[in-house]
Amino acid sequence: MATSDDAPPLTQAHFDRAKFRVGGKAATRSEWQDAVRARVGKQRISIMLDTPIIEHFKATAGERGYQTLINDALRRAVEGEHLAANLRTIIREELQQVTRSK
């Protein structure tokens, strides 16, 4: 059965032979990882979380990393705060316009 992905499956041997490059130049694995982190804009931190929180994200994660899910949840929380603040500002502005026009 044909799939939409014609690329052959990758094995660990493929990754073991991989050559790392940064800016077109040979790089070590560590240099490549640093370059990826810099481009993605992530930082490594140490944080203490409640055990039930970690267990929830680990149980939910599946193939994705649980830390990725925690990051996504935090991003949505921040974006939600921005959305709520923006909506309050818009509503205030609209109410002021309605009040002025009366």
Image (cartoon, rainbow, N blue to C red):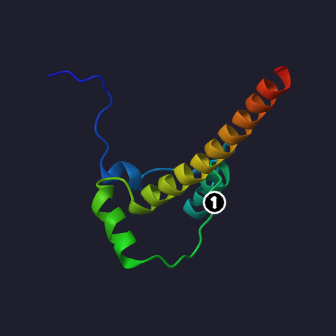
Residue at image point 36% right, 63% down: 57
**Between residues 32 and 64, which one lies in front from this camera angle?**
64
Query: Would you name the residue on which mark 1 appears?
Result: 34
Residue 47 place in picture, x, y as percent: 54, 76
Q: Given the image, on which type of amino acid does mark 1 rest?
A: Asp
Residue at image point 33% right, 65% down: 56
Residue at image point 62% right, 50% down: 81
Residue 49 place in picture, x, y as percent: 47, 76
> Which quarter of the rendered picture does the N terminus lie within?
top left
Residue 21 place in picture, x, y as percent: 61, 48
Give left or right: position of 58 versus 27: left
Give left or right: position of 22 versus 16: right
Give left or right: position of 60 versus 66: left
Residue 76 place in picture, x, y as percent: 53, 49
**Between residues 17 and 76, which one lies in front from this camera angle?**
76
Residue 29 is drawn in which quadrant?
bottom right
